[in-house]
Amino acid sequence: MLEELLNIGEVARCETGYVARRNFGRGAVIGPIVAQNASLALSMIRAMARPGEFLRIDTTPETEIAPHLKAMGLEYVGGGTSMVRGARRRATAPWSVMALASQAIG
């Protein structure tokens, strides 16, 4: 998936996380966002966002970054679904998925 995102957008990474951004609809979508903590996730979001641009981030109100996104002016407007086959496994890596890639990658 990351290879495809590189073909249609941009990906930034560091030792403790990565983020992707691509054009979408009337602006851009940022995701996936995989980071060791909320602070890093928010730093990567700020690095990928463009001033005045419509921005979509597919996450839920329960994530660590949700209150910070709201403070940045990004309101939660709908439900995304993370689909898994079988039982959802507990994360064993020190990173967390803070936002999905998008439900509209095609």
Image (tube, helix red, strand yellow):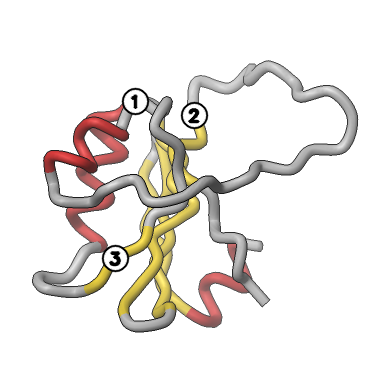
**Total labels drawn:** 3
Task: Tell me, for residue 45, which label it has, or none.
Answer: none
Q: Tag 3, which secondary structure?
A: strand
The amino acid sitting under disc 3 is: Leu
The amino acid sitting under disc 1 is: Glu
Q: Quadrant of the N terminus?
A: bottom right
Residue denoted by label 3: 55
The amino acid sitting under disc 2 is: Ser
Query: Where residue 101 sits in the image (x, y, percent)?
Result: 54, 56
Report the front residue among 24 and 15: 24
Query: Where residue 87 sits in the image (x, y, percent)?
Result: 84, 23
Residue denoted by label 1: 64
Q: Quadrant of the C terminus?
A: bottom right
Q: Earlier in the sequence, mark 2 or mark 1?
A: 1
Q: Tag 1, which secondary structure?
A: loop
Up/down of 81 relative to 38, above or below:
below
Q: Earlier in the sequence, mark 3 or mark 2?
A: 3
- Which residue is located at x 36 percent, y 45 percent? 14
Q: CA separation, marks 1 and 3? A: 19 Å
Task: Tell me, for residue 96, which label it has, or none.
Answer: 2
In the figure, residue 40 lies in which quadrant?
A: top left
Contact (Cβ within 8 Å) of mark 2 with mark 1:
yes
Q: Earlier in the sequence, mark 1 or mark 3?
A: 3
| Eye-nearest disc, 3 or 2 | 3
